[in-house]
């Protein structure tokens, strides 16, 4: 019933007519027919005055009282969805000799137009009036022309706001695009329906970063695919879409294809496919560099990282040539993540701190969030859990402040990781479960996997091995499918520890060897050390304590080599395995084997 009242704008006559129809229709059936409300609500109310017998008659009566100029503005306002600003009304309703502002004021006085949002005036038609005015617009032969004006206005608005999504005007640009969401969707639908390819591509390329910031990857995919369907044959695979020149393709199709491919990767739908390249000439420099950066950013964590690193380095060089401070900070932030993964902690810290300073100078809160996230990871690696928690809390606050809801699940999971490392399993589980539910609601698979992995880590450390294995195995296939070798290395190591704690040395050995292969493929020394520690547990369980001691020694040396000795919060498995091996060998033999392992090359350890 509330939906019926809202659709009929609370107009008493409309509600009275609707009530008569509910003698034969259910509420849902009535709602489904309200797109044709004038026919559905036509009523034989013989006792009512003739002009009140139908909703159309009532609006006809109001229409007849208008001047010709008022009718022009009123019917043209009908192409807007969920209202419009004065600027949009003046642009879309324009006609030589018309004072749109004055005419709007008269229509508001007549209650045919509703003024909303006192801080920034918006004007909207009641839904019944809008439906009536669309018919009048069509009868005047103006419907398609005015709809195209609407498309061009909102394409221009999106283009004008797009640069402000990076920098000091970020919050205001996001809020303005949020407010115009219904109009932007309506404009794209019109452009696609009328096959106005150029306008459709203008819209989607200008809105792509907004959709990413808002986490609306599904909406982005549908919109980009719709725009690309208008006579373009551009594929959506990484190799195809990024191999097209952004500089020479004036239609914008190559740019849209690259956004689509990057969005697939960000949404966990990437596939291995070589090293893509975005080519173009200097005329498209800023656009090309930012799309190149986005795809490299989205590809982080997939396959062997070479595609992401290659795109990011090229983007960094191009941003430098263009003097683009935002782009330079964005590229440094992603390259800092790469460096951290490879154990280059000094480089990672330098990139994160430089990126944070540049983003702050630019006024980009999203960028500050990403750089702070990197610094939080470094604090976690080095065991500074107090700083890690503070940075993670800052990241969550920034995400919530800007309404970057796709970032919130990851931020919660990262807080959960810090709680896990400090032994607060209840808090860790709460953060990870909240993150999981949000990710599921958003259809955000990467964030869902990250949260599930946190729940599995906690379950194993609390002795719930069956739960841990169930959660881990549920995601192993997905990680393999999207070529996520870094994630696979950790999942395999965790499964190996589960097998070892159950007393199955053969299964533990096999899983840890698989994890070590993944870690070495990625080039992540910390992941390789984790696999070696897991192998030590498998060898100790299998009755080979001397080999286990050598593996522990090699793992410790590997961690020391990158300046990241195992912090207190991650020592649980190593302390448990070390105690068992020392007991089996005796202190002196254990120390000798440990030192021998530390001196061995990695390939000779296993």
Image (spheres, rainbow, N blue to C red):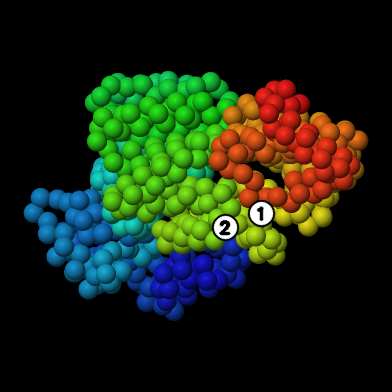
Q: Are marks 1 and 2 in contact (CB under 8 Å)?
A: yes
Instruction: Report how far apart the C-alphas of labels 1 and 2 lie in the structure.
Output: 9 Å
Instruction: Name the secondary structure under disc 2.
Output: helix
| Residue 597 point in image, percent of width and height | 73, 31
Work out which quarter of the rendered image holds the N terminus and state it.
bottom right
Q: Which mark is residue 385?
A: 2
Residue visible at 34% across and 57% down in the picture? 171
Which residue corresponds to the image point at 65% horizontal and 60% vertical from the top-left? 422
Q: Residue furthest front?
A: 588
- Residue 103 percent coordinates (x, y): 17, 64
Name the residue beneath numbered marker 1: 569
The residue lying at 69 percent from left, 61 percent from top is 423
Please tell me which of labels 1 and 2 falls first in the chain. Answer: 2
Q: Height in image: 129 above or below 370?
A: below
Q: Residue furthest left?
A: 97
Q: Horizontally, is 324 left or right of 26 in the view?
A: left
Residue at the spot 39% in from the left edge and 47% down from the top edge: 353
- Measuring from the top left, give residue 63's x and y in whole percent: 26, 64
């Amino acid at each position: 019933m509330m939906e019926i009242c809202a659709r009929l704008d609370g107009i008493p006559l409309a509600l009275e007519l609707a009530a008569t129809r509910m003698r034969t229709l259910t509420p849902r059936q009535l709602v489904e027919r309200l797109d044709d409300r004038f026919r559905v609500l036509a009523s034989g109310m013989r006792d009512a005055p003739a002009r009140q017998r139908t909703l159309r008659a009532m609006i006809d009566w109001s229409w007849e009282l208008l001047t010709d100029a008022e009718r022009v503005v009123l019917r043209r306002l009908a192409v807007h969805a969920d209202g419009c600003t004065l600027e949009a009304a003046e642009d879309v309703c324009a006609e030589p000799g018309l004072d749109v502002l004055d005419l709007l004021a008269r229509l508001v006085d007549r209650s045919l137009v509703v003024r909303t949002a006192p801080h920034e005036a918006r004007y909207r038609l009641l839904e019944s009036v809008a439906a009536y005015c669309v018919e009048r617009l069509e009868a005047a032969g103006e419907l398609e022309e005015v709809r195209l004006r609407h498309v061009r206005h909102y394409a221009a608005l999106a283009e004008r706001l797009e640069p402000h999504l990076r920098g000091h005007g970020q919050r205001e640009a996001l809020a303005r695009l949020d407010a115009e969401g219904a109009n932007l969707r309506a404009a794209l639908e019109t452009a696609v329906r009328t096959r106005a390819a150029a306008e459709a591509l203008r819209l989607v390329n200008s809105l792509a970063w907004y959709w990413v910031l808002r986490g609306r990857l599904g909406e982005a995919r549908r919109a980009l695919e719709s725009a690309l369907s208008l006579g373009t044959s551009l594929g959506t695979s990484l190799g195809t879409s990024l191999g097209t020149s952004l500089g020479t393709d004036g239609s914008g199709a190559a740019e849209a294809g690259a956004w689509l491919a990057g969005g697939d990767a960000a949404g966990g739908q990437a596939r291995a496919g070589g090293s893509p390249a975005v080519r173009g000439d200097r005329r498209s420099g800023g656009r090309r560099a930012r799309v190149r950066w986005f795809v490299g950013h989205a590809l982080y964590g997939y396959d062997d990282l070479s595609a992401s690193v290659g795109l990011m380095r090229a983007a960094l060089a191009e941003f430098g040539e263009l003097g683009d401070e935002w782009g330079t900070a964005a590229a440094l932030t992603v390259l800092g993540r790469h460096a951290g993964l490879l154990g280059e902690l000094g480089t990672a810290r330098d990139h994160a701190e430089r990126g944070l300073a540049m983003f702050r100078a630019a006024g980009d809160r999203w960028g500050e969030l990403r750089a702070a996230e990197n610094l939080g990871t470094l604090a976690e690696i080095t065991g500074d859990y107090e700083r890690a928690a503070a940075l993670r809390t800052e990241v969550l606050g920034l995400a919530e402040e800007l309404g970057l809801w796709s970032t919130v699940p990851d931020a919660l999971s990262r807080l959960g990781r810090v709680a896990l490392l400090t032994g607060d399993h209840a808090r860790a589980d709460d953060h990870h479960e909240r993150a999981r539910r949000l990710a599921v609601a958003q259809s955000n698979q990467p964030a869902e996997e990250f949260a599930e992995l946190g729940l599995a880590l906690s379950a194993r450390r609390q002795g719930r091995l069956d739960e841990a294995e169930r959660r881990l195995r549920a995601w192993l296939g997905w990680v393999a499918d999207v070529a996520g070798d870094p994630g696979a290395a950790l999942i395999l190591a965790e499964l190996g520890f589960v097998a070892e704690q159950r007393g199955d040395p053969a299964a533990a050995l096999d899983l840890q060897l698989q994890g070590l292969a993944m870690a070495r493929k990625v080039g992540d020394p910390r992941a390789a050390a984790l696999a070696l520690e897991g192998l030590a547990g498998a060898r100790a369980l299998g009755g080979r304590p001397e080999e286990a001691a050598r593996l522990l020694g090699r793992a410790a040396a590997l961690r020391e080599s990158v300046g990241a000795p195992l912090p207190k919060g991650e020592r649980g498995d190593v302390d448990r395995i070390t105690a068992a091996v020392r007991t089996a060998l005796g202190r002196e033999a254990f120390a000798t084997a440990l030192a021998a392992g530390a001196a061995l090359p990695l390939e000779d350890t296993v």
